[in-house]
Amino acid sequence: MTGLIAFREIVLKVHSRCDLACDHCYVYEHADQSWRARPKVISPGVISRTASRLAEHARDHALPSVTVILHGGEPLLAGTARLRLVCEEFTRALAGTAALDLRIHTNGLQLGTRCLDLFAEYDVRVGISLDGDRAANDRHRRFADGRTSHPLVLAAVDLLRSEPYRRLYQGLLCTVDVANDPVAVLDALIELEPPRVDFLLPHATWAAPPARPDGAPDAYARWLLRVFDHWDRLGRPVPVRLFESLLSTLRGGPSLTESLGLAPTDLVVVETDGTLEQVDSLKSAYEGAAATGFNVFDHSLDEVAAHPGVRARQLGLAGVSDTCRRCPVVRSCGGGLYTHRYREDAADGPGFDHPSVYCSDLRELVDGVAGRTAVRESAPELADPAELARSQAELTRILLARLHEDLAADPEWLRAWDSLSGVEAAGEAGANALDSVLDHPFTRTWVLAALDAARDTRPDGPRAARRLAALTAAAVLRGGLALPAEVVHRDGEVYLPTLGLLRLGEPGTDGTAALRVTDEGYAARDGRAEHRFGPGTGDARWFPVRTWSPDPDAAPVALEDLDPHRDCFTRPPRLRLGAGEADAWRARLDAARALLHRTVPGFARAAGAGLSTLTPLAGGPRAGSWGEAGRHGPGALGVPYGAGVRETALALLTGGRRARLRELTEVADLYALDGAWQHPSPWRERPVPVSRLLADVYERVAVEAYRRATATHEPDGADRIQRALDRLSGAAELTVTGKRLVEELHWELKAVDA
């Protein structure tokens, strides 16, 4: 089945006629008139064969669930006996294979208690078509003799909303007409308390364009934005799928509707005679547009999935026109509904390789929703450092919980986990101490490495348990807790995260030791003797983590040259610094920090915010690579030990920028479909994905400020940054949060220029 789409949804036409004469109906009023030659009612044979085909498809593709939508015409005209047969056959066929989600889309005129009792028995959810208030609904949804259908539809909705049927109420489907009052339409729909509202653009193509009473190319966008504004003012009282899909894609998430976004279509239509067709809306394009040549009696659903017309709608970005691929909103609009792209008068012949006939509307709608919601929908981590820190702390704990799931069968891991849980339960002191060790940047490094090992089917529970036990012991000692803390030392040593390294034996020896808090510091008993260690003990076997105090009003920064997981940068870390080397490095760091605060104070403050750990790296500075952010938690930087004051200043600056951007990307979506487009970069020979271009610009703005302040800047440095920013501003990959970040960079560059 490789390469074929799995159909998760079937639209089953149970009746091909309708009891209304809606003049905007694509089945009866548009190009394809194949309904005239089809049976009015689906036969038992078609029902049974379709159910078998779907069950076969679900088994072959291991689908956990499938959806069957009863459709028409008007499906309720099939009668309760035939509808019961549908429910029975599909329930029987899918039993033990996949969960069955049954739905029906109806105009509601025939909806009574007999139908609803049947639907309650089989949990069939009901969606009803209603275009709003009476004036709006009567514009199109009338009987053939012109009578209104509105009161009968309202009665059906009222019955559906009542007990015991309320749980079956799926929502309301409303076709947009710009001649209607958008506020009145939304109010009328909301009054009926639907679980969801779908607004549908009327089906149209370039050959048969939509009505535009005022001739404006954005009439539908303006109408929908008025609905959006009213919906937003009311507090978004009901879900509106069109708007929620836009908000999802703007945040970097998936599309929630076939009519927008780049997600592949996973739907197939079965007509009343068993004919298998593509999505029904294609009937608006031309006669036979939806045809595949297949039927349920002679063909499998996989054969339909291989049809060129079906596969064309699985291509995502590659399936839209060149014009759409260059558009900054294509991730959200997806080129519009496939049907709406059809054009007869194209130079290369009729086809769908064009922008939507609603192109102007979709562009304005996406931009309008984005502009109205940018501040609220942006990730709070972008503007609030405390929120970023909270999200990062939560991420480490989520990853640790996943590691626990992977290693829960290992007895050594379980013992270590129980000890950790004991610290967490030891009141505020225990919780604070545990936070300190879990927030140590290299705790994240260890967790990620252990997860990699577990996911590669080579889990090492005992090794992971040793680090977890050391974390727990460090928390016990930090918190001054009267709890047991046993650690395993390998090669005579054990590292206690955030505290230091303790030698408990000779090189090449392994063993265990029980650690505890004493009045003077800490003690370790290894079965033979007890060793006192910790601050002020002078024990030669204890190597504490050194610190640097750049700001007397802030917590000191750890100079981490002991943690075995500090090797997470692109260049190797230095071994343990000698006392003189550590003092010399502190002096260079002090001078570098002073230089930054003198030349670029705003950038310096931002680079220092949240900095908790510096790791000395081997070697000196390399061109284009100064400070490093590696695979670790927040707060850590790698800085070349051999760098001079100016280079160290640049390392702190660039490393801080890299670290913040990495932290943002780990907890907030700045872009989606990274790599789908390649962008020219002023600093690289070949085009790069948006993630690389954004990282380059984010770093270069700060570097340009520093170099200008130190009179070492390049003549065209700002121009190159501006070109890259202009490119980013039009990048379709950026989410609403990513766009706000680019706006920040624009303002930063303006400040640098000023």
Image (spheres, rainbow, N blue to C red):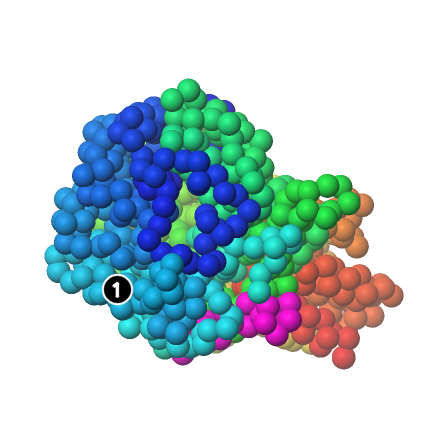
Residue 158, by quadrant, is bottom left
Q: From this view, report whether residue 661 is shown above or below residue 686.
A: below
Percent x, y for residue 644? 72, 58
SS assignment at label 1: helix
Q: Amino acid at mark 1?
A: Leu
Q: What residue does disc 1 label?
A: 152
* Residue at (20, 59) in percent of width and height: 160
Q: Would residue 509 appear left or right of 549 to someone viewing this image?
A: left
Residue 400 showing in the rendered view: no
Q: From this view, report whether residue 392 is shown above or below residue 270.
A: below
Percent x, y for residue 595? 69, 71
Quarter containing the C terminus: bottom right
Percent x, y for residue 641? 65, 52
Query: Toward the viewer: 529 or 694?
Result: 694
Q: From this view, report whether residue 302 is shown above or below residue 690.
A: above
Which contiguous range is marked in magenta? 212-233
Query: Toward the viewer: 91 or 43?
Result: 43
Which residue, as the protein is rendered here, is positioned at the far front?
145
* Residue at (67, 56) in percent of width and height: 327
* Residue at (81, 65) in percent of width and height: 719
Q: Would residue 716 appear left or right of 46 to someone viewing this image?
A: right
* Residue at (34, 39) in percent of width and height: 40
Residue 482 is inside the magenta segment: no
Percent x, y for residue 184? 39, 77
Which residue, as the protein is rendered here, is positioned at the far top?
298
Please name the predominant secondary structure of the magenta segment in the image: helix
Q: Would residue 127 appear left or right of 742 to someone viewing this image?
A: left
Residue 194 showing in the rendered view: yes
